[in-house]
Image: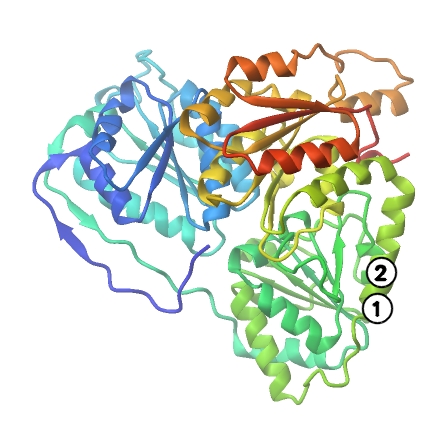
């Protein structure tokens, strides 16, 4: 997320008496918000009315509350700034919770403004419309911070604190509750201007120890996670890898940090697929940057040095056999190590040219070709049909899973994933928000037929708001991974995993959406090339069989 090395002085804009809803709108404007994703309801209508007067904020209405927060997440990841969703309390907030949980898993800065019941009724269990007792507690496990305001004067400070929480340390979603009577009430307020905050700098002694270990390494390796993407640390990762001749491996959340064609980049590890384990066992010093490091079965060996850089102290406390734990922003930590290495006389002149990385990259490509040729052909079709700066939303579907490993994100491109939350229904609504932030860049949602049917009504949102993305629906007539599991672990005893699908062309036509069906990778490549060039939303449906996902190879 955007960051700076200095804190700007906080300014206060003294405003005349205004309603809570207007204080909310002006506070969002002061923080630089230009889009709010929302679904109306009685407790938040004052906020809707206030947004009517905004010349800075576009309100995008959806057809389900889950989409408000999914769109805010997709927007946040592409725009590199917080996304904002607005919903009613109770069922509205709970509907949005799956998307908020996804943002938490992906460390994405999403502000969910959920209304509340009238403040005089809080805690009384009266059965007010949409009432959920202790709604704040419901969200605590899936947000970084949340609070409730009970006066008009508290609103600007709460919004300001929310943005500070989202943009400092490890980013994440936050939740703010405002009762309807507070939105409607009037009071004197002071609107706070946006601030920029310093990134966390590393301790010099730890940097010196890390540089000493890396300078003495014979076979170093670098593992990058989503923290490097959020910190914008791509140049620093590449510079360090080239200085040390260190292969780089990434998690799916780090796709795009280093262009796929870089000589030191090996590829990604996902589920059972990848060569991280083999590579890391063959490395004497391993640098982990901005990653949870969920490599199951890996244990540091005697004589290995594990260096970890993370902005989240909780990650540093996890036992990965870490020798040196550096509490810092990924970009600043890597830059400091690079400078320390240069000061020690490490100049990269005698470093190799990525031969070790090439060896492991060839192994990964051979594995993919041997184990999943059909799946890789579909991924390759998507890659060849899109420009390098395209944004791909990888859904919980077979080709989505394989794209996490086999889709090459080149310079300027992005891939958005649900992270460990892994929820069906993620890709299409998230892609809607991503497209609003992406502007003229192509945005492609890779959906399964099961996942897409969580929100087909949002085709109306795409049409109404002119969100010209491309939705690719892979149709195998089943919850494919679960059907494959039944076939190979449960004696092919199918129950509850196969389903009836609509006629996709008829469905798309009902919303005025262009559609096309294909059944070969070459046809998909042609159809997708045509669709991304159009100035309208499109749906492409692909017929394919149930195939092995990466985590269920047999």
Residue at 69% of width from left, 56% of height from top? Answer: 319
User: Visible in this render: residue 172?
Assistant: no
Colouring chosen for the image of the structure: rainbow
The vertical placement of 220 against 42, above or below, is below
Which label number is shown at residue 360?
2
Residue at 48% of width from left, 44% of height from top? Answer: 438
What distance separates the C-alpha of mark 2 from that of mark 1?
A: 7 Å
Contact flag, marks 2 and 1 (Cβ < 8 Å): yes
Q: Could you tell whether 426 is left or right of 322 in the image?
A: left
Q: Could you tell whether 260 is left or right of 299 in the image?
A: left
Q: Position of residue 384 (x, y in %)?
A: 71, 45
The vertical placement of 442 against 523, above or below, is below
Residue that label 1 marks: 356
Q: Position of residue 266 (x, y in %)?
A: 77, 59
Q: Which quadrant is the C terminus positioned in? A: top right
Q: Position of residue 472 (x, y in %)?
A: 65, 29
Q: Position of residue 205 (x, y in %)?
A: 56, 79
> In which image quadrant can residue 379 be found?
top right
Which label number is shown at residue 238?
none
Residue at 33% of width from left, 42% of height from top? Answer: 34
Provide the secondary structure element on which disc 2 rests.
Answer: helix
């Amino acid at each position: 997320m955007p960051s700076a090395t200095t804190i700007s002085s906080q300014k206060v804009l003294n405003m005349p008496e205004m309603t809570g809803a207007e204080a909310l709108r002006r506070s969002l404007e002061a923080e630089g918000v230009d889009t709010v994703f929302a679904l109306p309801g009685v407790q938040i209508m004052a906020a809707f009315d206030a947004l009517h007067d905004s010349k800075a904020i576009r309100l995008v209405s959806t057809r389900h509350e889950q989409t408000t927060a999914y769109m805010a997440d997709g927007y946040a990841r592409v725009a590199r700034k917080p996304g904002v969703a607005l919903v009613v309390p109770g069922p509205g907030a709970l509907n949005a919770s799956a998307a908020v949980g996804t943002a938490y898993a992906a460390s994405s800065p999403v502000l969910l403004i959920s209304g509340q019941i009238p403040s005089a009724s809080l805690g009384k269990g009266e059965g007010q419309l949409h009432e959920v007792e202790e709604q704040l507690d419901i969200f605590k496990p899936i947000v970084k911070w949340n609070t409730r305001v009970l006066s008009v004067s508290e609103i600007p400070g709460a919004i300001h604190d929310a943005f500070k929480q989202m943009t400092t340390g490890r980013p994440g979603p936050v939740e703010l509750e405002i009762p309807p009577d507070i939105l409607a009430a009037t009071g004197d307020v002071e609107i706070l201007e946006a601030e920029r905050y310093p990134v966390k700098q590393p301790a010099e002694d730890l940097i010196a120890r890390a540089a000493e270990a890396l300078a003495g390494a014979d076979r170093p390796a670098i593992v990058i996670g989503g923290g490097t993407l959020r910190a914008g640390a791509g140049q620093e990762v590449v510079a360090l890898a080239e200085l040390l001749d260190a292969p780089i491996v990434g998690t799916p959340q780090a796709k795009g940090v280093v262009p796929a064609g870089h000589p030191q980049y090996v590829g990604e590890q996902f589920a059972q697929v990848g060569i991280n384990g083999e590579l890391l066992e063959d490395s004497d010093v391993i640098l982990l940057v901005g990653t949870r490091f969920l490599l199951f079965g890996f244990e540091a060996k005697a004589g290995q040095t594990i260096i970890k850089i993370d902005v989240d102290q909780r990650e540093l406390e996890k036992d990965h056999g870490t020798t040196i734990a550096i509490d810092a922003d990924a970009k600043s930590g890597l830059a400091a190590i690079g400078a320390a290495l240069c000061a020690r006389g490490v100049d990269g002149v005698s470093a190799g040219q990525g031969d070790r990385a090439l060896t492991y990259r060839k192994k990964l490509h051979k594995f993919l070709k041997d184990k999943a040729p059909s799946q890789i052909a579909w991924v390759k079709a998507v890659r060849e049909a899109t420009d390098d700066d395209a944004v791909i939303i990888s859904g919980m579907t077979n080709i989505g899973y394989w794209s996490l490993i086999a889709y090459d994100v080149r310079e300027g491109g992005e891939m958005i994933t649900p992270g460990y939350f892994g929820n069906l229904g993620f890709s299409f609504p998230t892609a809607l928000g991503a497209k609003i932030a992406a502007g003229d860049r192509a945005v492609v949602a890779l959906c399964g037929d099961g996942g897409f049917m969580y929100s087909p009504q949002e085709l109306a949102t795409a049409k109404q708001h002119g969100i010209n993305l491309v939705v690719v629906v892979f149709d195998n007539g089943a919850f494919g991974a679960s059907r494959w599991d039944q076939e190979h672990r449960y004696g092919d005893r199918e129950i509850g995993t196969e389903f009836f699908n609509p006629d996709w062309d008829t469905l798309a036509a009902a919303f005025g959406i262009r559609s096309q069906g294909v059944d070969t990778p070459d046809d998909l490549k042609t159809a997708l090339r045509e669709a991304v060039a159009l100035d309208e939303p499109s749906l492409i449906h692909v017929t394919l069989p149930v195939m092995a996902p990466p985590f269920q190879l047999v």
